[in-house]
Amino acid sequence: MKEFVKINVRDNVIIALQNFSKGQSLSVDGKEIVLLSDVERGHKIALTDINSGADIIKYGYPIGHAIADIKVGEHVHVQNVKTNLGELFNYSYNPVLSELTHPNRNLSFQGYKRKNGEVGIRNEIWIVPTVGCVNGIAEQIIREFKAEVNPTDIEGIEVFKHNYGCSQLGDDHQNTKQILSDIAMHPNAGGVLVLGLGCENNKIDEFKAGLGDYDTDRIKFLSTQKVQDEVTEAITLMKEIYETIRKDKREAIPLSELKVGLKCGGSDGLSGITANPLVGYFSDFLISQGGTTVLTEVPEMFGAETILMNRCINHDVFEKTVHLINDFKQYFIDLKQPIYENPSPGNKAGGISTLEDKSLGCTQKGGIATVVDVLKYGERLKTKGLNLLSAPGNDLVSTTALGSAGAHLVLFTTGRGTPFGSFIPTLKIATNSELAKNKPHWIDYNAGPLAEDKSFDEGLNELVDKIIKIASGEKANHERSGFREIAIFKSGVTL
């Protein structure tokens, strides 16, 4: 098993792949290094003496600067490192585009073709509340519908509860309408009941009009204040939906039709060494097969944004990326909050010292592919290839945004672990084997062996096989546990 890794030849730190004790000696690039303190797995060790004010180099890029003289063999972390980042910047476009080298393997998955030409990987009935007031009624409808019909020949029935749909103004109100509309039109739903109250801001008639051209056999609407027995009325509509979708059958779909969201949460020092680069390798592979990926968590691009900007396909996409970054920074500034209040305590415990450290690891999930488009929050995918999406780092909000953009599933890398899942399959990829061993009911794939003896080609083949199985109907662990949630971005007042 490897003891440490030096990620880039330019780096002046190495990453511990196991716990070390003070006084232990390591041989790095033909040089013996004696550790000056205990160092935990995932944390950084100085390869050379680093003067106060000098850059700390990891991934080949600065992740901050030393705030004290650091000796060779010393633990490099928050006690002696500070971010280099400032606030708003002017950027220049210096394109560096890479060719993807994966050959076309003509792979397919078993999915559902929808009437509008889209493809789904689940065939479920969803209840989408227009307002949080009807969350409880939706749960009651599902209980009574299941008791009466026993719908075992479809893949699930879910309600995606939320707190919004009323007492909102401006962007918050528009965000709620847009995200709920995106969910109602998502191809993973075989059918949808849009359930309203009747007096909310998110009016059901306006919501219906906002969907545009939709399949009336599969999307139904009910305003509960307008009927005497809302549960009976809802069950009647659910039965109509059920009789339609139970006839749907999976069929072979080219992998080029798959859309995958890229997300991380609870990162550790191995995230940028195992799981994130593996997901980036997969992203490049899927794009080479004609497919689509979407990368989000804008605050976790800060510090690595120029890498993404220089991978933009043209100047227009570059300008959209600049706005993506600076508009999100302005959001922090307008609310008088620090832009770089990151990484989290869990990130720091895992070995991540600064936001650049985190961002350079996070953005590896996007591989090396060209950035073809940048989406606003709530906007749907239009262009195949690597897309960027405006959303925060918050796990539930950003994963919901990825599904709302049209992703069929999300690859979620984690070094600390999390049980949650969004309204689309959310595959947890462990950065380390200890997490995968301790939480097998959370973790869907273990990337930890990539720090041991497994090659990235082996890991990619395993991950591709796993994703095809999930896209073809195998349930992710959160689906087996019944954990399905949504969260909508909010920034304004509540009336």
Image (cartoon, helix red, strand yellow):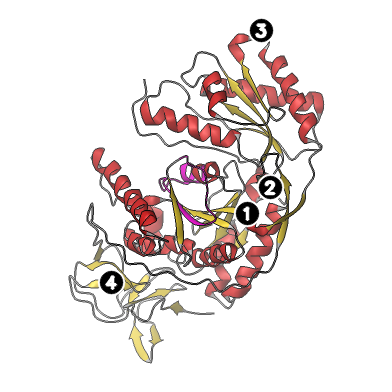
Range covered by the magenta-colored residues:
378-400
Q: Look at mark 1 in the image and give the residue it sits on.
A: 258
Q: State the separation of the CA atoms marked 1 and 3.
A: 43 Å
Tag shown at residue 228: 3
Lower position in the chain sequence, tag 2 or tag 1: 2
Q: Which residue is mark 2?
A: 121
Q: Amino acid at mark 1?
A: Leu
314 relative position to 84: left or right: right
Q: Position of residue 241 (x, y in %)?
A: 74, 28
* Screen quadrant of the C terminus: top left
Q: Quadrant of the N terminus?
A: bottom right
Residue at figure coordinates x 45%, y 66% from the top left: 272
* Circle 2 Cα neighbour tier, 10 Å, few/some/many (<14 / 14–19 / ≥20): many
Query: Which one is earlier in the sequence, the residue at label 3 or at label 2?
Result: 2
Image marks 2 and 1: residues in contact by CB distance under 8 Å: yes
Which amino acid does the dot numbered 3 rest on?
Gln
Q: Residue furthest top?
A: 228
Picture mark count: 4
Looking at the rendered structure, the kind of residue marked 2 is: Ile
| Residue 280 place in picture, x, y as percent | 51, 64
- Residue 294's tag is none
Res. 437 visible in picture: no
Q: Which is nearer the N-term, disc 4 or disc 3?
A: 4
Q: Which residue is pictured at 72% across the width and 53% down the height?
A: 472
Secondary structure at badge 4 equals: strand
The location of residue 27, given as percent across then percent down, is: 40, 88
Q: Residue placed at 36% from the left, 67% from the top?
A: 95
Contact check, label 4 and label 3, Cβ < 8 Å: no
Question: Label 4: which residue?
Answer: 56
Cα–Cα span, label 3 and label 2:
36 Å
